[in-house]
Amino acid sequence: MTENFANIADLTGAFRLPELVSYQDHTVVSREIIRKPSGTLTVFAFDADEGLSEHTAPFDALVYLLDGTAEITIDGKPHTVREGEMILMPAHRPHALKAVTRFKMLLVMIK
């Protein structure tokens, strides 16, 4: 694997998404699995109390929690999302993420 991009040739068999990215103290870590003109798949690991400030994206985004608990705010409304749950962040709507506990997630962006 390269620093921030998973080598697809290494992922042709079954694999565990949470193992593609490791927690690091006081930071957010990401690893892109797929980057295509139609969208991306990225795995993230957020340390406790870390997050992404409010922003918008031009594409719909689906977040699936692999581990832990996150607060995901969409259009100013907070949502608690736990391991095994997912939430849709619609295109062009402001959203932010904050780690309630350490958490890992799969982000699916569809263009």
Image: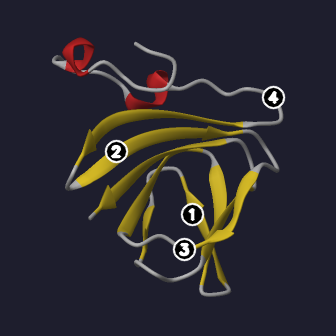
The kind of residue on which mark 2 rests is Leu
In front of the other: label 3 or label 1? Answer: 3
- Secondary structure at numbered mark 4: loop
Marks 2 and 1, how far apart in space? 19 Å
Q: Quadrant of the N terminus?
A: top left
**What residue did someone put label 3 on?**
56
Q: Position of residue 91 (x, y in %)?
A: 40, 77
Image coordinates for residue 66, horizontal then vertical, percent: 48, 43
Label total for image: 4
Pick whichever of labels 1 and 4 is earlier in the sequence. Answer: 4
Confirm or deny contact between disc 2 and disc 1 (CB under 8 A): no
At label 3, the amino acid type is Thr
Q: Residue 25, labelled with which disc?
A: 4
- Residue sitting nearer the eye, 20 or 1: 1
Task: Identify the mark at residue 41; answer none if there is no mark.
Answer: 2
Circle number at residue 81: 1
Pointers 3 and 4 in contact (CB under 8 A)?
A: no
Q: Say whether residue 72 is visible.
A: no
Q: Secondary structure at mark 3?
A: loop
